[in-house]
Image (cartoon, grey):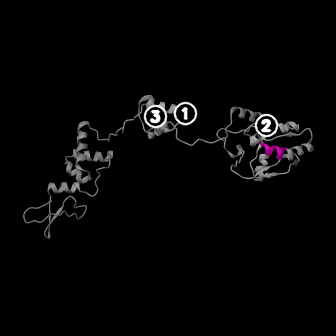
């Protein structure tokens, strides 16, 4: 703001909140009060607190409309409330057009996919649970021609409760394995729905992998064999020559004809040379379901020793 003549460059001085609507300019050593429309507009557009980017609530909109209906000018209302005049002008124009001042919420960006395409993604993901998000949007594009992003696939499946998670690893049991295990054990527990993993309804099982020392032992009610310890991998030949010949065959002589041999279904135990050795020694082997170490009593003994 510049004053012509002998006056110097004017500078607005804001003393306090009460004088914010008045305004001053400094002319030499004297302050001159101004009441011009230009100065008021300058003060309105340069207030410390302006709500240009904040949404107005319905109460504040009603205050603005009430002041305008009472005969106040838009500039006066703008100075008093601290909102730019353009916002008040648009609000007043809208009120005059349809009598409504509530905020209209936009629907946002239109959805790229239709409800049928959303169902197609859901059905495809359920049919092939191992499909990636890239596979799904490529299948959708090939089937319908609609191109979407991976994030869109994640959002659409998330709406129906499908999320990308790592699969739970388990022992590969077939239907035959389940049938043989149940026929062999015939063991059930009584539990309520949703309590499958409660402590009283579970049997602990520890599985250790990697290299280490192998310890073999045989037990029977009231007796046991000597422990055999080795650091090499167990094979069919070692199982026959060491375990069967040096331990099982000697143990058979002390038990007699009622001897019934039980071992698991590990590959060295089911080798052809092992079967031939058992037949030659007339040793009867118990039928054993696959993947069932938890049914073997000696496995629980190892757990107690560990």
Is residue 148 rendered to the left or right of residue 275?
Answer: left
- Point out residue 145 in the picture as x, y percentages from the top left corner: 41, 30
Question: What residue is pinned by disc 2?
Answer: 272
Q: Residue at x 70, y 39 (%)?
A: 191
Work out whether mark 2 precedes mark 1 in sequence or the reverse, and give the earlier one: 1
Front residue (pair 79, 25): 25
Front residue (pair 48, 276): 276
Mark 2 burial class by Cα count in 10 Å: few <14, some 14-19, many 20+: few
The answer to whether the residues at label 2 and label 1 have Cβ atoms under 8 Å apart is no
- Residue 45: quarter of image: bottom left
- Point out residue 100 in the picture as x, y percentages from the top left corner: 28, 39
The answer to whether the residues at label 3 and label 2 have Cβ atoms under 8 Å apart is no
Secondary structure at badge 1 equals loop
Question: What residue is pinned by disc 1?
Answer: 128
Question: What residue is pinned by disc 3?
Answer: 138
Front residue (pair 149, 252): 252
Front residue (pair 122, 86): 122
Instruction: Return the residue found at the far bottom.
Output: 29
- Point out residue 271 in the picture as x, y percentages from the top left corner: 77, 39
Work out whether mark 3 precedes mark 2 in sequence or the reverse, and give the earlier one: 3
Mark 1 burial class by Cα count in 10 Å: few <14, some 14-19, many 20+: few
Classified by dominant secondary structure, the portion drawn in magenta counts as: helix
């Amino acid at each position: 703001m510049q004053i012509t003549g002998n006056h110097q460059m004017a500078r607005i001085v804001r003393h306090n909140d009460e004088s914010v609507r008045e305004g001053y300019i400094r002319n030499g050593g004297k302050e001159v009060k101004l009441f011009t429309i230009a100065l008021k507009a300058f003060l309105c557009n340069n207030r410390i607190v302006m709500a240009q980017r904040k949404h107005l609530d319905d109460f504040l909109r009603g205050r603005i409309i009430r002041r305008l209906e009472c005969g106040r000018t838009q500039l006066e209302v703008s100075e008093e409330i601290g909102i730019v005049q353009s916002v008040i002008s648009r609000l007043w124009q809208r009120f005059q057009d349809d009598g409504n001042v509530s905020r209209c919420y936009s629907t946002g960006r239109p959805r790229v996919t239709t409800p049928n395409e959303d169902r197609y993604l859901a059905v495809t993901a359920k049919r092939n649970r191992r499909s990636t998000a890239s596979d799904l949007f490529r299948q959708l594009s090939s089937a319908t021609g609609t191109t979407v992003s991976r994030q869109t696939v994640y959002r659409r499946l998330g709406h129906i409760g499908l999320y990308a998670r790592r699969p739970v690893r388990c022992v590969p049991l077939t239907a035959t394995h389940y049938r043989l295990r149940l026929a062999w054990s015939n063991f059930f527990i009584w539990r309520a729905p949703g309590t499958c993993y409660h402590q009283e309804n579970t049997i602990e099982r520890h599985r250790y992998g990697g290299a280490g020392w192998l310890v073999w032992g045989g037990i029977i009610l009231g007796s046991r064999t000597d422990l055999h310890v080795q650091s090499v991998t167990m094979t069919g030949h070692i199982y026959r020559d060491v375990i069967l010949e040096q331990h099982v065959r000697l143990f058979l002589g002390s038990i007699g004809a009622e001897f019934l041999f039980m071992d698991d279904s590990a590959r060295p135990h089911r080798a052809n040379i092992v079967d031939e050795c058992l037949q030659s020694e007339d040793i009867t082997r118990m039928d054993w379901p696959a993947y069932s170490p938890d049914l073997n009593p000696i496995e629980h003994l190892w757990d107690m020793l560990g």
